[in-house]
Image (tube, rainbow, N blue to C red):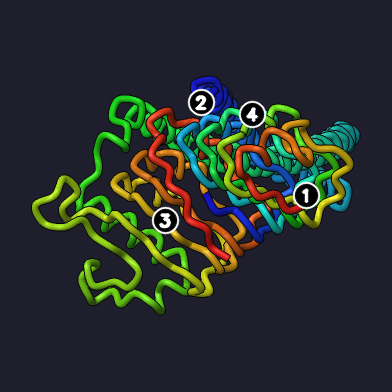
Amino acid sequence: MGLNENQLTSVPSALGELTALTGLYLDGNQLTSVPEELGHLTALTSLELHENRLTSVPAELGKLIALDGLDLRGNQLTSVPAEWEEGGALEKSGCHIDR
Amino acid sequence: MRRYIKARVSERAEAAKVEAEELREARQLLQAKGAESTARAEEARRRAEEAGAAAASGGGGGGGGGGGGDASANAMVAAAGKLAAEAEVLSAQVRDATAAQEAAAVRERELQDALAEAEGAGATATTVEEAAVKVAKDPPAAGGSTESDADALRAWRAECPELRKLWDESEPVTEWEGVTFGEAGGADAGRVVGIDFENKGLTGDVPAALGGLTALTSLDLHENQLTSVPEELGELTALETLILSKNQLTSVPAALGVSPRWSGWASTRTS
C-alpha cells in the first residue's frame, strides 16, 4: 500500500486489519506517530517510515520481524522497539536497517 | 440515525403544514372582516353626508319644522359626526386587518417554502435509507457488471476535468486510457480490473462511484494532486494493490482496513 509522499498527519488504526499486507509505504508524510495496531501486520516485508516527524514508534512494531528492510531516517526518534535496536532481533534476522 | 432524521423532518413538515392551514383560514376570516368593515364604513359615510346635507338645508331654509326642525337637524349633524367617527374606526380596522392578512400571507409563504424544503429533505432521507437498505441486502462486492463498471467510470469522468480531456466520451470505455479490463473467458471478463493514472494531473477528490468497481485488483493513482479518497474504496474487496503515493492527501479513510475479505494485498513500491 503506497501512501508515501502525501500530507498525512495520521493513519487509521484499522490498517492493522490488513494482515496479508506485505508492503506499507508511509514515508514522506507528517506523521508524528503510527498506530500500535500496525504490529498486527506480521506479513510485512517492507515498512517505510522515513521522512516523517516520528519521535517514537510503538513497541508492538517490534513484532514485525519479517521485515527485509527498515528505513527510519529523517525522523526525530529517540527510541525504537528493542527488537529494532542495533544488534537486535531484526538485524540478526538479516534485515537492513537505516537509522 | 437516518430513521430519526427522517422522522424529525416529517414531523416538522407536518407542523408547518398545519400552521400554514391555520394561517390560511385566519387570513380568509380577516379578509371577510375587512370587506364587511369597508361596507359598513361606506354606509356610515353615506348616511353622515345625507344627515349633513339635511341639516344644512334645514338650517339655511329657516322654515320647515321651526324649532322642531332645528332640533331634528342638530340630531342629524350629531348622528353624522358619530357615523363619521365610526367609519374612521372601521377604516382603521380594515387597515389592521389588511396588515395582519399580509403578514399571514408572508408567514404562510415562508412555511410553504419550509415545507417544500422539509419534503425534499424527507425524500433525500428516504433515498439514502433505501440506498442503505439496498447496499445491505446486495453488497456491491457481490454484484457489479460491465455496465455498472462503465457507469462508475463515466461518473468519475463527469466529476474530473482532467479525465474529460483524457477520455473521449464518443469512444467505448474499453478504449479509455489507463483502464485495464478482464480478459475474455476469465472470471472478470469485461470488468475493470486495473486503473493506472500515474502523473495525469488529476485534482480534487476521488468519487465514491469508484467503490462500484468491485473487480478492481490494482488502483494506481500516484503522482497526481488528489486531496481525498472516498471510504467506498473499502468496497473494493478484490483490490491487491493500492498506490496513492505523491498526492496531497491529508488523511486516508479507516474503511481501507475494515474488510476482512481484503487479504490479497501485494506491495508495490513507487518512488
The chain letter under disc 4 is A
Report the residue marked by disc 4. A63
First along the sequence among labels 2 and 1: 2
The x, y position of residue B148, in whole percent, is 25, 50
Left/right placement of residue B233 relative to residue A48 reads: left
Residue at (82% x, 52% y) in the render: A75
Give the amino acid type for the residue marked by disc 4 in the picture: Lys
Determine whether B18 is above or below B103 in the image: above
Residue under label 1, please give it: B53
Q: Where does the N terminus of chain B fall, quadrant-wise?
A: top right
Within the image, what quadrant is residue B90 found in? top right
Q: CA distance from mark 4 to mark 2?
A: 42 Å
Query: Callout 4 environment at 10 Å: few (<14), some (14 to 19), or many (20+)?
Result: some
Q: Nearer the viewer, mark 2 or mark 1?
A: 2
Nearer to us in this view, B98 or B89: B98
Look at label 1 and name its amino acid: Ala
**How much space separates mark 4 and mark 3, taking CA atoms?**
29 Å
Q: Which mark is residue B219?
A: 3
